[in-house]
Image (tube, grey):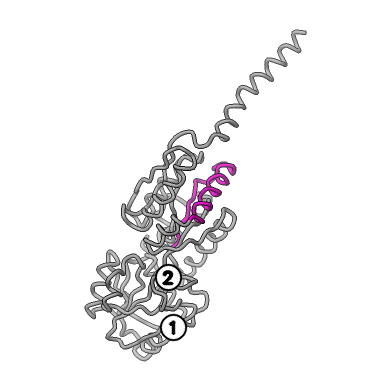
Amino acid sequence: MMKRLLVSLAAASLCAVVAPSGSAQNSYPSKPVKILAGFPAGTSTDIVARIYANKLNQHFGQPFMVENRTGFAGNLAADAAAKEEPDGYTLLLGTIANAISASVYKKKLRHNFLNDFTGIARVASAPNVLVVDPALGVSSVQGLIDYAKARPGKLFFGSAGVGTAPHLSGELFKQMTGIEYVHVPYKGNVQGLGDLSEGRLSMIFAPAPTLGAFVKTGRVKALAVTTAKRASFLPDVPTMVESGLPGFDTAIWYGFLAPKGTPQAIISSLAKVILEATDREDVQKQLANSLAVPVPLGPTEFNRFIREDVEKWAKVVGSAKITVD
């Protein structure tokens, strides 16, 4: 009788220990959740993070708070997120910058983008746009290629800095076409666009949100967008693929990630809500206001995409011998 009583008490104690854990997971989230964004307030990364934070808040009834951890090409946020407990209460709004940095900054990073994170959902992308000095007199990508090949090393290519997505877009363009140019790195996109509009540069790959009046006023000429499909705000501008460069896709993507080891039930729950939000007309309008388009991917497809993107940029970085370590 005593033995049976002790066994019963032990079983009851075990249930008491196990139940809260299962209950806690089933009731996720039971406290506020942080979304770390690697770029300042008002940037497209910050805007995308806040669009979805609002929808997650509405669905779960808990605050999803965006924290801007800026600096180091977006990697301060990734460094911080990688150190957090994998419990679903810290998320990262990752971008193409993280995939590129895995090769460019690999000796300086305090995280491994492939090994330390798991993808939840990719949500949107925005194009880089190949723009040129109108004075060049070219009206197509092929025209630019022909112009450059007739003047090897005479063109000046501006970028937002060594190792940035616009810089790597230019390096990929160089590798795929065989052209040569002089690279002029800036500390941001606006400075380069200013010099391009004044005739001091020949070409730039610029993120669409920074172009604004530069294209509308004719101060620069747009030749192609780097997304797989044409951009609604530049409907007459072809893609790089349409311009004769198959596989050229250097869109700035945005997606949610969590520290590796986050329970699959939490990943699945977040992915479901995020992907459902991406289908909403109001969310798509908000994305469009930031010149982004929905390109949703679930966890499995997003993780595959991340691996492929990291591998793609590793090859470009290696061929161009780019390093800032």
Q: Residues within 10 Å of mark 1 (few under 14, many from 20)?
A: few
The relative height of residue 321 versus residue 111 in the rendered view (above or below) is: below
Give yes or no for residue 260 being in the magenta stretch: yes
The relative height of residue 23 versus residue 57 in the rendered view (above or below) is: above
Q: Which residue is mark 2?
A: 232
- Secondary structure under the numbered disc 2 in the rendered image: loop
Q: Nearer the viewer, residue 149 or 212?
A: 212
Q: Quadrant of residue 199?
A: bottom left
The relative height of residue 6 versus residue 128 in the rendered view (above or below) is: above
Query: Residue 68, how many percent across, how many down?
Result: 34, 48
What amino acid is labelled 2 in the image? Ser
Query: Residue 33, how many percent across, how many down?
Result: 44, 40
Q: Residue furthest front?
A: 281
Q: Quadrant of residue 166?
A: bottom left
Q: Nearer the viewer, residue 236 or 79?
A: 236
Question: Label for residue 178?
Answer: 1
Magenta span: 253-280
Q: Residue at x 43, y 77 (%)?
A: 173
Query: Residue 55, how many percent across, how many down?
Result: 45, 47
